[in-house]
Amino acid sequence: MQRNIVSKSLVLAASLLAVGYTNMSCRSTGGMSGRDISTNDNQTTMITPPHDEQAAISTVSLGGTSGEEIKRMMAGYVPALNENLGDIAMVETYDEGLIVTMNKGNIFNVDSYMINEEAKGDLLRVAYSLKQMPNTFVVVNGHTDATGSKEYNENLSKKRAIQVANYLKGAGIEEKRLLVDGYGEKIPKYSNKSYTGRNKNRRVDFIIVADNNIRENVINTGSIR
């Protein structure tokens, strides 16, 4: 049996404290709650979520000249990510990190954290991309639609993140790179008023940031290498 990936609040804190940074804090910034349930399948408009994941990246960003070096390194990964994942995910650069948002709603069924068989191929493609960028931490963020209570959805989203992180581990991603968090229903990418929108909101996103070796090199030498 695979050992579950430990919560990011424990692992990333220990990792980044080595170079003077605290853990990524993913507190809600308020805004849309996502509780706009209906059965009208015509309402699938993409919506703008609160930027909790962006705030998480900013929490561990170095800033200054060191931060600019890391930004250049992370930006260099974007073309290959888009080539491999462009039809199944959106890649966003923000500050000194990347956010990869899965845009296909085939990962989880309602009220389930088991990965659908048809989604495993997409996650293998994610794993392939992550292998091409080894000097990074990867935070797997679980999400839900807005059915059920907020507390239940938050717990469910964490289980989804753990399940996906363990799948990536089984696909060859080192466990020390993998961290997890759950946002519940707080960051819907699509309206929860439609079946299609709710399906797409049952997803995982990935925050990718430079690891400690990169940070230490930049701090000590002023460059990535």
Image: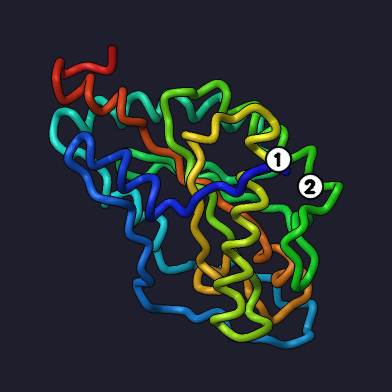
The residue pinned by badge 2 equals 119
Image coordinates of residue 108 in percent, x first then y, are 76, 60
Asked whether the residues under the numbered discs 1 and 2 touch, taking CB atoms below 8 Å apart as contact, a structural biologist would say yes
Q: Amino acid at mark 1?
A: Leu
Colouring rule applied to residues: rainbow
Q: Amino acid at mark 2?
A: Ala
Image coordinates of residue 57 in percent, x first then y, are 34, 48
Q: Residue 218, relative to residue 127: is it above or below?
A: above
The residue pinned by badge 1 equals 123
Image coordinates of residue 114 in percent, x first then y, are 77, 58
Q: Residue furthest right?
A: 117
Query: Which one is nearer the viewer's eye here, 166 or 135?
Result: 166
- State the SS at label 2: helix
Image coordinates of residue 148 in percent, x first then y, are 66, 84
Mark 1 closeness class: few <14, some 14–19, many ≥20 residues within 10 Å: many
**Residue in the image at 36% along x and 24% along y:** 73
Q: Quadrant of residue 36?
A: bottom right
